[in-house]
Amino acid sequence: MSEFSPGLVTVFGGSGFVGTQAVRALARDGWRVRVAVRKPALAQDLRILGEPGQIQPVRCDITRPADVTAALKGANAAVNLVGLLFQAPGRSFAAAHVEGARNIAEACVAGGVGRLVQVSAIGADANSGADYGRTKGEAENAARAVKPETVILRPSIVFGNGDGFLNRFADMATTSPALPLIGGGTTKFQPVYVGDVAEAIARSAIRPEAAGRTFELGGPEVWTFKEILQYILRETGRSRILAPIPVFAAALLGRITGLTALIGIAPVLTRDQVLMLKVDNVVAPGADGLTDLGIEPTGLEAIAPSYLWRYRRGGQFAPNPGAVEA
């Protein structure tokens, strides 16, 4: 079966960390890209990722069916990248994840959009004890219930320049004498490069054989939380205490720090994030993955040094960057 010919693809939530790379990959493959976001004025810089006129940001609130229908007008494919890391007044997981996914799937069916790619996460499970994981799982079910051939992509923790994981702890290590080892740091991750995730999105949008399949996206190596923090310290040349924090204590702390979301400030930690750390975040045995899309996974150590240098004393000119300082 031959690939679809690129036409117009609508990318919901295309201005974020992963979305920006996905837009670039889709444009490179020849798609005209409509980027549907809540604040298009903040997404104008995406235009330079393609040829003149190839990428167009438009306003869309995915909880409003009329907005979604308008954003999908004339589209051949759609990608849903909308996701919240924490809830805030007027922005709930249920609305952004579940209601949004259902609205997009229904509009795709009504508008004859051939391909829908739903970007989820490893750990998505409608029975999860964490609101984030539960609603991500419910979003998958909602999309497939309406459009069974929806392609679902579940990445593990995503790394790359601008990520919110390695950068967060590297930045923390510049000022804090200790880094938190929640649950002892034994949770396993399979970090996946943002460029590989973007390419998986682009290939899922065009390959007929991807229809109705779920792909779990992970890198070539499995790391424990502790190993990742140790790597960050080595790469940034810093010596910090790794302080074990029991899950129950971290969950309590997450409840408290999560209150900053009520005034529009991103929490340092949330209860949901702690609960998600209770389960390993790795590709399930036998699951379809990057290689099934013809993508060779990129390792963490091949990319992370290209941006973690900014956290060293002396930056890129720091002597012996791998050495640990006192």
Image (cartoon, grey):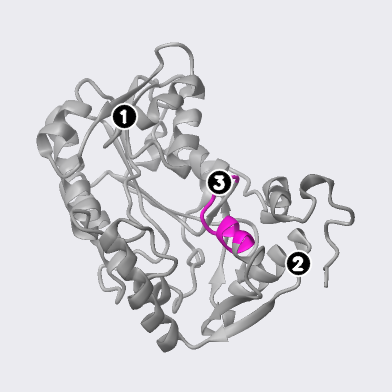
Q: Is residue 125 visible?
A: no
Q: Which of marks 3 and 2 is in front?
A: 2
Placement of 43 over or under 192, stated as above or below? above
Q: Is residue 270 magenta?
A: no
The x, y position of residue 52, in whole percent, is 45, 11
The secondary element bearing badge 2 is classed as loop
Three-letter amino acid code at the position of disc 3: Gly
Where is residue 264? Give x, y as percent.
30, 56
In the rendered image, the quadrant that contains the C terminus is: bottom right
Q: Which residue is drawn at 48% across and 14% down?
A: 51
> Hey, which quadrant is residue 262 in on the image?
bottom left
Which stretch did the figure color magenta?
A: 161-171
Give x and y (percent) for residue 114: 26, 31
Dot 1 or dot 3: first in sequence order is: 1
Q: Magenta span has 162?
A: yes
Residue 10: x, y in percent?
30, 29
Residue type at mark 1: give it. Answer: Pro
